[in-house]
Amino acid sequence: MKKTIKLDNIDPIEIYGAGNKILSEFCTYFPELRVVARGDEIILEGKESRIQEFTQKFGELTERRQHKSGLTIYDVEDIFDGESSPERFKLSGDAVIVHGTDGKPIRARNRKQEEMVQAYFDNDLVFAVGPAGTGKTYIAIALAVRALKNREVKRIILTRPAVEAGERLGFLPGDLKDKLDPYLQPLYDALGDMIPSRKLQEFMTDGTIQIAPLAYMRGRTLDRACVILDEAQNTNMGQLKMFLTRMGCDAKFIVTGDASQIDLPRREDSGLLRGIEKVKNIKGVATLFFSNEDIVRHPLVSKIVKALED
């Protein structure tokens, strides 16, 4: 049996991939079929049942393309692993991001957090900048946990620069993990609210969740991961560039920071705001600025922040 699939209103390279990489991966699941791609037409030859299956799965692939800026071979794997096509997140005022370990729903608590959630689903790189207590990091980690539970990503990677907040801690005993844990404790706290301790330990043991200082990101390519850079105000331009260029296929990056709490020896070395200025107009990048009015901690926190700034 022969059949021709016509690509209507779709640029073939968006489906085939560069050098037909995506189509070639797709065809590995149908070794008994003869598949010839000619422009916007795909000619199939083989058993009718397999041609029908090819047509169905290929339809899922083209539908998936409508929800994404670009396809990768991971999309092909997802289709044959039985995962459904990704749907755009529809934000409502009471949308639950994920449920905590105590069963309570974790959701955006104000309009700015809602904007951050929507920006995450609409873009691959999100900058969230603002004062302490606005929930930037907490919402970012909730989004990452949601993505992991929904199999949208295969791992979560959390990182922050190991910069002391105005103190000199001196020698810290223990192995590398023991020395770094004080810097990374806020990330552990947030994860502990959303993932049961035993499961969290399993995830950290097998590498599904990784928490590491920023210096350990160099040289890596992070595919199918939700990656969060916290305390980004303590990075210089070189470090920020190094981090952002780790982005691999099907990755989501979130950068959070507070430009009023720079702990670098020279405040002018911070690359966060300068970096945002350079990339803010790139498609796929979203920038959100939180204010004192967006603080969701104890009511005194926003008053304290304002008083100290004044």
Image (cartoon, grey):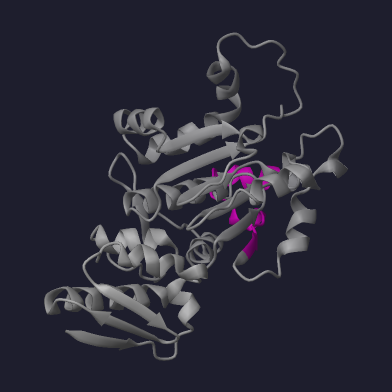
The residue shown at (53%, 47%) is: 222
Is residue 93 visible from the viewing direction of this image?
Answer: no
Is 288 covered by the magenta stretch? Answer: yes
* 131 or 189: nearer the viewer: 189
Task: Count every numbered label the image shows and give the total.
Answer: 0
Residue 166, position as x, y percentages in the image:
76, 27
Whether residue 170 sits left or right of residue 254 in the image: it is: right
Residue 207, position as x, y percentages in the image:
42, 34
Residue 253, position as x, y percentages in the image:
56, 53
The residue shown at (35%, 67%) is: 86
Considering only vertical position in the picture, is 139 above or below 265? below
The quarter of the rendered structure image containing the N terminus is: bottom left
* Quadrant in the picture for residue 186: top right
* Quadrant in the picture for residue 169: top right
* Quadrant in the picture for residue 212: top right
The residue shown at (75%, 18%) is: 168
Residue 263, position as x, y percentages in the image:
77, 34
Please report the bounds of the magenta region as a residue range.
286-305
Whether residue 215 sits left or right of residue 32 in the image: it is: right
* 309 or 156: nearer the viewer: 156
Considering only vertical position in the picture, is 202 above or below 86? above
Considering only vertical position in the picture, is 70 above or below 102? below
Whether residue 278 sits left or right of residue 138 in the image: it is: right
Is residue 194 visible from the viewing direction of this image?
Answer: yes
Is 110 covered by the magenta stretch? Answer: no
Considering only vertical position in the picture, is 8 above or below 252? below
* 94 or 37: nearer the viewer: 37
